[in-house]
Image (tube, helix red, strand yellow):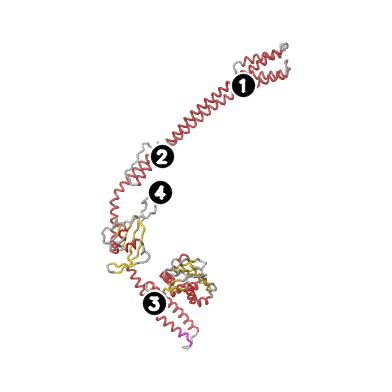
């Protein structure tokens, strides 16, 4: 029987029980209503007729006049048509005979006796109906009590039936569902031998059959794929073993899952089987392993001597996450993205480092060699502008001016390239001294004052009171601030202003330069401190080499400082750097 049919039969049975109880109640209520109706309709009318006839006798003494006789006669006629009780008919007939006797004039002598006779008959009729009312009232009360008992009994039976139905009927649905849920839980624990069996022939039996088929196929799949999984595991282990980069895998319990030969050689691990051991056992006597696990060498490349040769490595880490490894939510904690460990990769970048050093040395050499001819060209230009050598015409003067601008630009580029090569090779020499922030600002303003005056840009300086000193290299720090000011003047409109602000932030002193230019699009801000990057300028000629901000970043960071910018289109730009206070 299908579940839909069971539900229909169950609710149909409930409906039939409710209809039966309602019909039974209506039947007995109707019986009680009929009993009450008999009392009101029959006996009450008789008592009203008796009262009217007695009123006629009270209002006029015998003999009755015509009007009173007619009124008495009408009430008597109504009473004749309303005889319902035993003995009432005989009393009415005697009343009729006495009334006829009065109206015929035969009882003129014995009027008082006749009146007493009529009143006695009226009292008899009244007594008969009053006793009937009492009797019928008792019968109605008995009927009400009987009905109450029957309805109470029927209600109790109905309640028991409905209660039994509400308790037992849901079991037809919840029982199979509970067994299905238990079976699914067993399957989730990889207990593929679990089977379900329902005796009834309904949808649950079909679900149980499908569940059993699924469990069988899962068991077959697990058995058939075990060899494949082992083969793939060996394949992955072979690939990891043959990688030239050092690879170390650690699970969530800080146990080593795998480590290839390259990692063993770099870390000087002579244990043949470190897999399965706690990582803490290896880090106790191996400083390099401890640095790798603590990710102390993650930020920058580091050198290791391997086989008597210096090699450069870059540490990379990857979180291991296995999908569906655990339930998504356990005890209210989301475990869907819980890491299962980490993979540490020591990428060998020796070849790239050597090429980069060769490039840096080449740039340094070329830049150094270019400075000599450029200086000679600048000297020749100075001599050409000297009138003692000979006058030059206006066209020649313009050519000399253009040559001088290009020469200055070349000299600036070569200087920046030399600075960059010093930073990259680590040959930069810093002279740390305690310095007043105001000294650095004054030096930078003196360097760009002439350029600002030519463009009509005002330089506004805002400083906090009682600023602490900073321990810096004065020349390199001032160079950074000059670079900020040069860029601000280049992109500021004429007759505007540039704000230089020096403020204290806790243990830091911040230098910032704010211009009123067009601002920098957000998509370019992250790359602005990259080497050789320049913001697109809508086809306009670009000035500079794109190295100034990159070198500024290196100068500030080597002094343990931080550098950054804030900008929005149409609101200008604010470049800043922070240095530790003394």
Q: Where is residue 273 in the image (x, y as percent from the top left)?
A: 26, 58
Which segment is the magenta one?
382-387
Q: Is residue 5 visible?
A: no
Membership of 352 in magenta stretch: no
Instruction: Name the residue beneath numbered marker 2.
Output: 174
Q: Distance between the residues labelled 3 and 4?
A: 66 Å
Q: In which quarter of the image is residue 124?
A: top right
Q: Which of marks 3 and 4 is in front?
A: 4
Circle 4: element type:
loop
Mark 1, Cα crowd under 10 Å, few <14 / some 14-19 / many 20+, is: many
Disc 3 + disc 4, Cβ < 8 Å: no
Q: Distance between the residues labelled 4 and 2?
A: 25 Å
Q: Which is nearer the eye, 433 or 367?
A: 433
In which quadrant is the C terminus drawn? bottom left
Instruction: Name the residue beneath numbered marker 1.
Output: 43
Circle 3: element type:
helix
Instruction: Name the residue beneath numbered marker 3.
Output: 367
Earlier along the polypeptide chain: callout 3 or callout 2?
Answer: 2
Q: Where is residue 109 in the image (x, y as percent from the top left)?
A: 73, 11
User: In the displayed structure, would residue 393 be above or below residue 198?
Assistant: below
**Residue 331 - label:** 4
Earlier along the polypeptide chain: callout 4 or callout 2?
Answer: 2
């Amino acid at each position: 029987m299908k579940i839909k049919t069971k539900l229909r039969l169950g609710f149909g049975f409930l409906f039939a029980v409710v209809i039966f109880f309602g019909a039974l109640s209506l039947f007995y209520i109707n019986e009680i209503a009929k009993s009450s109706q008999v009392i009101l309709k029959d006996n009450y009318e008789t008592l009203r007729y008796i009262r009217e006839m007695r009123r006629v006798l009270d209002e006029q003494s015998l003999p009755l006049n015509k009007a009173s006789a007619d009124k008495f006669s009408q009430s008597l006629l109504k009473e004749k048509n309303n005889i319902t009780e035993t003995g009432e008919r005989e009393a009415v007939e005697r009343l009729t005979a006495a009334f006829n006797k009065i109206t015929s004039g035969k009882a003129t002598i014995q009027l008082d006796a006749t009146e007493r006779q009529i009143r006695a008959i009226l009292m008899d009729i009244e007594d008969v109906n009053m006793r009937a009312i009492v009797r019928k009232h008792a019968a109605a009360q008995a009927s009400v009590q009987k009905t109450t008992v029957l309805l109470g009994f029927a209600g109790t039976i109905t309640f028991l039936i409905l209660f039994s139905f509400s308790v037992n009927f849901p079991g037809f649905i919840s029982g199979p569902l509970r067994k299905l849920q238990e079976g699914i839980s067993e399957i989730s624990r990889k207990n593929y031998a679990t089977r379900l069996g329902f005796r009834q022939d309904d949808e649950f039996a079909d679900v149980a059959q499908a569940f059993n088929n699924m469990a069988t196929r899962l068991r077959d799949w697990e058995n058939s794929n075990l060899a494949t999984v082992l083969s793939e595991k060996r394949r992955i282990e072979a690939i990891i073993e043959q990688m030239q980069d050092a690879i170390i895998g650690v699970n969530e319990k800080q146990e080593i899952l795998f480590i290839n030969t390259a990692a063993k050689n770099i870390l000087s691990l002579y244990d043949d089987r470190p897999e399965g051991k706690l990582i803490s056992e290896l880090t106790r006597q191996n400083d390099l392993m401890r640095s790798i696990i603590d990710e102390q060498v993650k930020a920058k490349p580091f050198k290791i001597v391997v086989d008597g040769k210096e090699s450069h490595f870059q540490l990379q880490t990857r979180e291991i996450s296995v999908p569906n490894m655990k339930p998504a939510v356990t005890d209210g904690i989301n475990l869907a993205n819980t890491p299962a460990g980490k993979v540490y990769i020591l990428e060998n970048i020796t070849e790239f480092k050597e090429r980069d050093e060769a490039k840096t040395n080449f740039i340094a050499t070329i830049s150094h060699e270019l400075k000599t001819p450029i200086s000679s060209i600048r000297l020749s230009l100075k001599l050409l502008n000297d009138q003692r050598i000979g006058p030059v015409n206006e066209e020649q003067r313009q050519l000399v001016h253009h040559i001088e601008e290009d020469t200055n630009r070349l000299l600036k580029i070569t200087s920046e390239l030399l600075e960059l090569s010093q930073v990259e090779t680590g040959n930069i020499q810093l002279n740390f001294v305690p310095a007043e922030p105001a000294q650095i600002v004054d030096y930078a303003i003196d360097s760009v004052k002439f350029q600002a005056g030519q463009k009509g840009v005002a330089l506004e300086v805002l400083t906090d009171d009682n600023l602490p000193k900073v321990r810096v290299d004065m020349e390199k720090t001032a160079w950074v601030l000059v670079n900020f000011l040069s860029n601000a003047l280049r992109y500021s409109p004429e007759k505007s202003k540039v704000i230089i602000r020096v403020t204290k932030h806790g243990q830091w002193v911040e230098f910032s330069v704010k211009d009123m230019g067009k601002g920098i699009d957000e998509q370019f801000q992250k790359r602005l401190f990259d080497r050789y990057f320049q913001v697109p300028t809508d086809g306009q000629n670009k000035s500079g080499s794109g190295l100034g901000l990159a070198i500024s970043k290196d100068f500030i960071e080597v002094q343990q400082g931080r550098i950054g910018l804030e900008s929005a289109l149409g609101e200008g730009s604010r470049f800043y750097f922070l240095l530790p206070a003394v």
